Image (tube, rainbow, N blue to C red):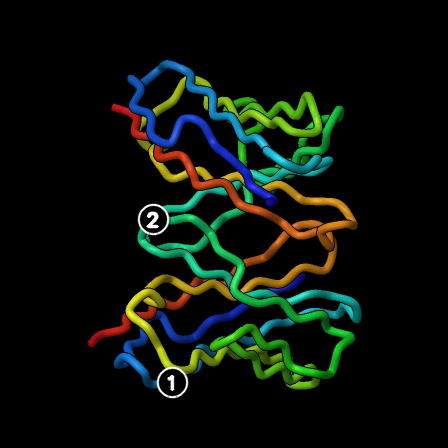
Amino acid sequence: AQTVTQSQPEMSVQEAETVTLSCTYDTSESNYYLFWYKQPPSRQMILVIRQEAYKQQNATENRFSVNFQKAAKSFSLKISDSQLGDTAMYFCAFRAGTALIFGKGTTLSVSS
Amino acid sequence: GAVVSQHPSWVICKSGTSVKIECRSLDFQATTMFWYRQFPKQSLMLMATSNEGSKATYEQGVEKDKFLINHASLTLSTLTVTSAHPEDSSFYICSARAGPNLNYEQYFGPGTRLTVT
């Protein structure tokens, strides 16, 4: 069975600083996708970034980038130049078939 | 593009009654939709996967007779909570899986807050 583990329940960062959220996963599949979703106080799930397992290059979306270590089954999210609007719960997710499997989430607080 | 709506956004019902939640993909067709349940400050728990025109597949521990799912068209799935009880109070989120033109991405609805009194 696939599992996704986020070991940081809460994190905090100052505006303009950089923060890294950790995620590890376990699977025997060779073809899969990894995602980071953001859930702000509105509770609308927002896709932040996705990574295909067959791609060695780390995905990047503006201030958001990932460090994908396939052998270590690690998929961390780096947020650069943190903004107040980044305050949210962040979920790491895995998909091998059709359904997404979510980690327990990390609550990120950005302060001024 | 790729918008998913849910209706209602918030509903209060009395214990013993049934309530229906709608999930619509507004600008794409979704052969597969998913229903999740989320308690405060917790993760999303997959309840069931629904495929258009066929019976839903429920996750272990989810009562199929209590949470009725219908996926009658490529743009609409409904979740009916039957004989609701206070412990069914939760935040329910649907997502719709797009086709190859959108990389089979899942798009999430804004959620429905159910309170059973």
Q: Which residue is located at x 78 percent, y 75 percent?
A: A54
Circle 1 Cα neighbour tier, 10 Å, few/some/many (<14 / 14–19 / ≥20): some
Q: Find residue B59 and report its image quarter.
A: top right
Q: Chain of mark 2?
A: A
Whether the residues at callouts 1 and 2 have beta carbons within 8 Å, the answer is no
Residue B56 in the image: above or below residue A97? above
What is the secondary structure assignment of the residue under circle 1?
loop
Q: Quadrant of the N terminus of chain A?
A: bottom right
Q: Residues within 10 Å of mark 2 (few under 14, many from 20)?
A: few
Asked whether residue B61 is in view, the answer is no
Q: Residue at x 75, y 77 (%)?
A: A55
Identify the amino acid type marked 2. Ser
What residue type is disc 1 on? Answer: Thr
Q: Quadrant of residue A8?
A: bottom left
Residue under label 2, please give it. A42
User: What residue would you read off at disc 1?
Assistant: A18
- SS for tag 2? loop
Q: Can you name the residue that lies furthest to the left here?
A: A112
Residue A87 percent coordinates (x, y) = 32, 66
Percent of width and height locating residue A89: 38, 62
Marking on residue B70: none
Left or right, residue B25 beside residue A18: right
Residue B74 appears left or right of B17:
right
Q: Position of residue B103 (x, y in %)?
A: 73, 55
Q: Residue furthest top?
A: B17
Answer with left or right where residue A84 lies relative to residue A37: left
How far apart marks 1 and 2 lie (CA) works out to 24 Å
Q: Is residue A24 above or below residue A39?
A: below
Determine whether B91 is above or below B55 in the image.
Answer: below
